[in-house]
Image (spheres, rainbow, N blue to C red):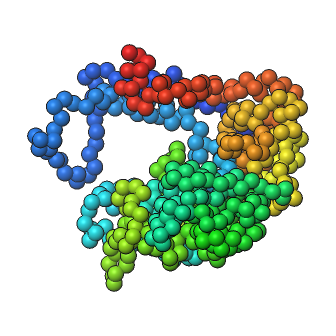
Amino acid sequence: MSSHGESFATLPVAPKPALRRFHQARWDEEIVFELSRPGRRGVGVPAPGAPLVELPDGVRRETPPALPELSQNQVVRHWFRISQETLGADFNIDVGQGTCTMKYSPKVNDTFVRDPKVAELHPLQPESTVQGVLEVYWRLEQILKEVSGMARVSLQPGAGSAAIYANVAMIRAYHASRGEGEQRDQVITTMFSHPSNAACAKVAGYEVITLMPDADGYPDIESLRAAVGPRTAALLITNPEDTGIFNPKIREFVELVHAAGGLACYDQANANGILGITRAREAGFDLCHFNLHKTFSTPHACGGPAAGACGVSEALVPFLPGPVVDRVGEEYRLTAPESSVGKIRPFLGVTPNVVRAYAWVMALGAEGLREVAETAVLNNNYLLHKVRQIPGASVPWPERRRVEQVRYSWQELSEETGVHSEEIGIRAADFGLHYWTSHHPYVVPEPFTLEPTESYSREDLDEYAAVLAHVAQEARTDPEFVKGAPYHQTVHRIDGSCLDDPAQWAPTWRAYLRKHRR
C-alpha cells in the first residue's frame, strides 16, 4: 500500500515503449596485462579441504610465470566490466542464431556440473572412483540410441564438427577394411547442409561434390543420381537443411547411395524440430551425429567447449572413436572398439556438457522431448508469419513448409534502399537483439536466418519481429542512419582487415608485443 492508502497496482506507471530501450555498457577497459603493476597481489581462496602440494624441485620453474599482477578488487572490476560489454544469451532474445539452436540452458544444470563430484574429477582417475559419471555417459548413450535408432553412440568428440570428422574417419576406415579405401575417394553433400560436412571431408582427403537445390528448394535428386558411383564413399547431409526445409525424399537419397556401395551420414545438428518424430536409422542412415551443445541444451560457451555424439549402425560399431563406456554387471568400464579410429579429443569427452545434456533429457522425459520439437516448429512458423508481413522481407521457396528455422531474404529491401542484411543485423543490436545472416556463399541473396527454438514466448517473438519491422522502416526513411549503426554498443564497427593477414595475428599477449609494440 502507498502512504495514501492506494494499492501499488492502481498507481500510474510509465507506459512501456513500443520498442525496448537498450544501451550496452561501455567501459574504456584495458586488457588485463595492461592493468598489471609489479608487486600487486590478490588473495585466492582454496577449495575447502584442498591439499597443499609441495612441488619437487625438478618440476619447479626457475622464474615465475609472466602473469598479470593485480589486486583482488581490480580483478573483480575487470571481469565484471568485460561481462557487461557482452551481448550474450542471458541478455537477449537469441532467435537470430539460425542453424545453431541457441536455446535456454537451465541454470540448475550448471549447479550439477559445479558440484565437486563433477568439477574436481581428473581424467586419469581409476575407473572404480568415477563410476557415477561413467553411468551418466552410459545412460545418455542409451537415450541417444533410442532417439536415433542407432546401435551404438560415442560421446567422445568435443564438438559437432569433431563429430562430423569422426564420422568421416569411420567412413574411411570402413571402406579400407573392405579393400575399397583408395577407390572410394568422393563425398557428396548439399549446398544447404552445414559447411562442416564439406570441410571435414576435404580435410580427410576426399573430393567433395556439392548438390545445389532444385526449383522446389530441395537437394536435386537427379544431380545425386549423376554423382553416385564406384568412387562414392558417402553422402553427408543435413536434414532439415539450413533453410528449414525437410527433404521428403531423404530415404530415396540414402538408397541411391547404398546402391552405389557408399554410406549415408546424417548431420542432425538441426534435429531440434524432429526429436521423437523421425529417427536416422529408420531413414536408412549408417551414421549420424547430434550436437549436445545445440539440440540437448548445453551452452555454446562462445563456440566451445561443445560436445558431439556419433551414432552408428551395427556395421560401424567396431570403428567408433573411443573410449566408450560399457556396463559389465553392476560396473561401468571404459573400452576401445576393436578397430577404433582413435580419439577425436583427449580423454573421455566433455563431461560437464554430457552431464548437462543428461539432466536436460531426464527433466523432460520422452514426451517432453517430442514437445520440444513441436513447440520449436510452432514458434518457428509463428515467427515466419510475422516476418512475412514486413515489407521488403521474403522467403525463398515460399510454398515449402519449414521445420525449426527459416532462411529469409532482404533482397527486395536492399534493392530499394541500398541497405544490406548485415547492416540490418548491426542496427538490430542497438535494440539488444542478436541477428545472423547465413553461411557463405550467399545462395539466398541478402539472407538472414532465424531459429526461435522452444525457449521463447509469443511476446519474445512479437518483440523480435517488431524490431525487424522497425529497422526495415528506418532503412526506407533514412538508409544512411541504418548504415551508420551501431549507436548503443560498446564499440562501433570492427576493422576486419587484419583477419586476412596472418602477419598481424596475435593469439597471445607476447605475440602482440612482438608484432605490434616491438
User: Hey, which quadrant is residue 497 in on the image?
Assistant: top right
Residue 98: where, in percent of width, then height?
Answer: 68, 50
**Residue appearing at x 85%, y 46% in the figure:** 394
* Left or right relative to 153: residue 446: right
**Residue appearing at x 73%, y 62% in the figure:** 226
Residue 319: where, in percent of width, then height?
Answer: 44, 69
Q: Work out whether residue 333 or residue 114 is closer to the camera in this orientation and state it.
A: 333
* Left or right relative to 65: residue 516: right
Residue 495: where, in percent of width, then height?
Answer: 60, 24
Residue 328: where, in percent of width, then height?
Answer: 34, 81
* Left or right relative to 516: residue 265: right
Query: Is residue 245 visible from the viewing direction of this image?
Result: no
> Is residue 222 positioned above or below 30 on the image?
below
Residue at the extreme bottom: 329
> Is residue 142 positioned above or below 439 on the image?
below
Residue at the extreme left: 57
* Left or right relative to 503: residue 66: left
**Residue appearing at x 67%, y 38% in the figure:** 432
